[in-house]
Image (spheres, helix red, strand yellow):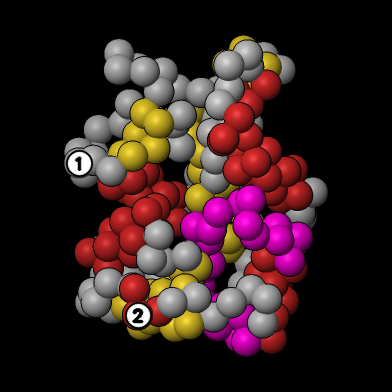
């Protein structure tokens, strides 16, 4: 496929970029600082900023799908969704957050006692972004929430998928960036969660 990956130099974005490259996809890797993007087969770095709307939309246009891996607390979610719409690309995948996952019916992670205040702005913005997507009917969107602990690690290919509930294993709720990237690219190649959120964890 021919893809646009926004936020390609970040923690999740750089692992997604490698996974996409390793699987033979052509990727326009978009970042504010394109010099930070890894030099990989099939990857074309491009500098673009959401605040420069016309140039950003142009950078997205003409691809089979858009994947965004941007921090929610510093991104205008409505503007980002509008830019994807304006680009004419219908398939849109989002590196989501864990805060909106449920620990019990109707009880979100972000609302639990002891949730770290330092994480609240990002988690709250991620939940709000998911709400915006759920109101969006003209994009084939997918929002993939990681587990609570989203960290560098190994690419094992051994993980579980869920829907709206936080996945917890023997070592707590965690997933590596590398295994998260596998789950995201699997969804890209074989869509199973159109206009849905799902989650991945050990």
* Residue 116 placement (x, y as % from top left): 56, 26
Image label count = 2
Q: Residues within 10 Å of mark 2 (few under 14, many from 20)?
A: few
Of residues 81 and 2, the one nearer the viewer is 81
Residue of label 1: 154
Q: Residue at x 63, y 57 (%)?
A: 74
Q: Residue at x 58, y 63 (%)?
A: 91
Q: Residue at x 28, y 78 (%)?
A: 42
Q: In the rendered view, would you say 182 is above or below 173?
A: below
* Residue 67 placement (x, y as % from top left): 50, 62
Q: In the rendered view, would you say 166 is above or below 74?
A: above
Q: Which residues are magenta?
A: 55-79
Residue of label 2: 35
Q: Is residue 21 magenta?
A: no
* Residue 20 placement (x, y as % from top left): 32, 63
Of residues 186 and 113, the one nearer the viewer is 113
> Which quadrant does the N terminus fall into?
bottom left
């Amino acid at each position: 496929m021919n893809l646009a990956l926004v936020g390609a130099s970040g923690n999740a974005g750089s692992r997604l970029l490698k996974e996409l490259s390793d699987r033979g996809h052509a990727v326009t890797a978009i970042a504010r600082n394109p010099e930070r993007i890894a030099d990989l087969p099939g990857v074309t770095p491009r500098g673009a900023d959401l605040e420069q709307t016309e140039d950003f939309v142009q950078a997205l246009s003409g691809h089979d799908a858009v994947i965004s891996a941007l921090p929610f607390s510093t991104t205008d979610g409505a503007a980002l969704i509008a830019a994807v719409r304006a680009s004419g690309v219908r398939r849109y995948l989002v590196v989501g957050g864990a805060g909106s996952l449920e620990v019990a019916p109707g009880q979100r992670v972000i609302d639990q006692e002891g949730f770290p205040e330092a994480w609240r702005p990002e988690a709250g913005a991620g939940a709000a972004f998911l709400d915006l997507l759920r109101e969006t009917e003209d994009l084939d969107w997918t929002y993939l929430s990681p587990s609570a602990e989203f960290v560098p690690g190994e690419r094992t290919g051994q993980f579980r998928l869920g829907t709206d509930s936080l996945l917890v294993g023997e070592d707590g709720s965690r997933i590596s960036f590398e295994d998260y990237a596998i789950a995201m690219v699997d969804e890209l190649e074989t869509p199973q969660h159109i206009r849905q959120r799902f989650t991945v964890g050990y």
